[in-house]
């Protein structure tokens, strides 16, 4: 199994510099990368004003020059069931899916929406199917897999936190380009048996977000995105299940920090809150990513499945 890491959190260190985030991952040892579009589509972003043809060429040029291989991506932040009826979500996610397809990324992870007004379980599932099916044309155009991510909370069984809900949703969508991106941190917050859940998903598993936290009972709702071994996720269950179901994707990290506070870290410099960029120098962050690569390699070597 190959290792990959998302470049998403690195924009906090390098501003809008795509090249710098990819060089960073390359130096840390990663050959395979998750090209995150999570924070690219914000108000005033050039991603709304620059053509996808131009943006895709920029991405492809960087990937080719650095000899990196994109393995998956992530749609932008947003709520498809938001107070505006999801209009802004559809605008940026539509652009993001087209961009990912033009770049040649094999899959992109999608989030389920959160209802603004209460819905029955059936209403929620029907609306979610409608939203995801709207992305089928662009997926078919590029042959790109759409991976639905398990959520970090479970409310009356309607928010797609476990394999049963995800399998039901995929049955309702009934399209070969849909699959699941399993988030180990989200599952841990729901205190799930991840071995059993992954076994239920089987061949429908197309991607991973690997990270750690302390579980829902100890720190409810704290989606910390920590390094493996710094929380209490049972990674023996995770890796054992991946091997048993014949998982074909990469062991993809979505790690932000070794240990993160439950809220924003209140960095202040010269009396001014540092909200845009991290106060940690990029060279120290690089040491963290290099350590992360070493952790991933050790984990997979322990199961005899590490691939360069």
Image (spheres, grey):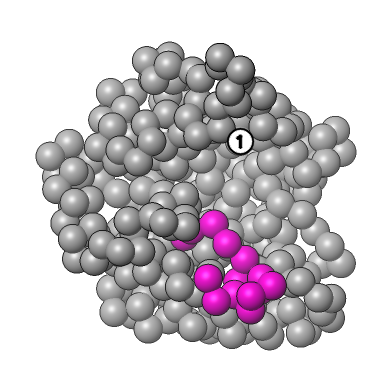
- Could you tell me which residue is drawn at 80 percent across and 59 percent down? 154
Near-viewer residue (92 or 190): 92
Residue 148, position in %: x, y? 55, 64
Please rate how many residues cluster around mark 1, counting C-alpha atoms within 10 Å: few if below 14, some from 14 to 19, many from 20: many
Q: Give the magenta-colored segment's residue range.
A: 74-88
Residue 32, position in %: x, y? 31, 41
Count up the numbered dots.
1
Residue 54, position in %: x, y? 18, 60
Q: Is residue 229 visible?
A: no
- Could you tell me which residue is drawn at 44 percent across and 67 percent down? 92
- Could you tell me which residue is drawn at 67 percent across and 83 percent down? 127
- Could you tell me which residue is drawn at 78 percent across and 49 percent down? 190
Near-viewer residue (192 or 11): 11
Name, please, the residue furthest toward the front.
271
Q: Quadrant of the C terminus?
A: top left
Q: Which residue is mark 1?
A: 225
Determine whether the residue tagged by mark 1 lies in a helix, strand or loop: loop
Q: Quadrant of the N terminus?
A: top left
Give the dominant element type of the magenta stretch: helix, strand or loop. Answer: loop
């Amino acid at each position: 199994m190959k290792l990959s890491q998302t470049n998403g959190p690195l924009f906090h260190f390098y501003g809008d510099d795509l090249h710098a985030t990819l060089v960073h991952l390359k130096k840390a040892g990663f050959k395979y990368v998750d090209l995150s579009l999570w924070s690219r589509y914000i108000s005033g972003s050039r991603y709304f004003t620059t053509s996808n043809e131009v943006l895709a060429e920029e991405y492809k040029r960087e990937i080719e020059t650095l000899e990196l291989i994109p393995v998956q991506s992530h749609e932008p932040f947003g709520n498809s069931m938001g107070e505006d009826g999801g209009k802004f979500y559809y605008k940026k996610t539509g652009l993001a899916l087209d961009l990912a397809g033009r770049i040649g990324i094999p899959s992109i992870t999608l989030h389920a929406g959160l209802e603004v007004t209460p819905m029955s379980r059936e209403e929620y599932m029907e609306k979610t199917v409608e939203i995801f099916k709207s992305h089928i044309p662009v997926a078919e155009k590029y042959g790109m897999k759409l991976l639905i991510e398990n959520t970090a909370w479970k409310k009356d069984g309607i928010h797609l936190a476990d394999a049963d809900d995800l399998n039901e949703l995929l049955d309702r969508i009934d399209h070969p380009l849909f699959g699941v991106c399993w988030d180990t941190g989200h599952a841990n917050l729901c205190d799930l048996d991840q071995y059993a859940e992954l076994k239920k998903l089987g061949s429908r598993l197309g991607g991973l977000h690997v990270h750690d936290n302390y579980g829902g009972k100890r720190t409810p709702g704290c989606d910390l995105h920590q390094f493996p071994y710094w929380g209490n996720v049972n990674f023996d269950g995770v890796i054992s299940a991946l091997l048993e179901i014949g998982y074909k994707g990469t062991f993809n990290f979505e790690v932000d920090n070794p240990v993160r506070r439950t809220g924003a870290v209140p960095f202040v410099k010269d009396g001014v809150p540092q909200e845009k960029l991290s106060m940690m120098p990029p060279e120290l962050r690089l040491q963290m990513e290099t350590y992360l690569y070493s952790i991933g390699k050790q984990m997979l070597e322990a199961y005899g499945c590490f691939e360069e």
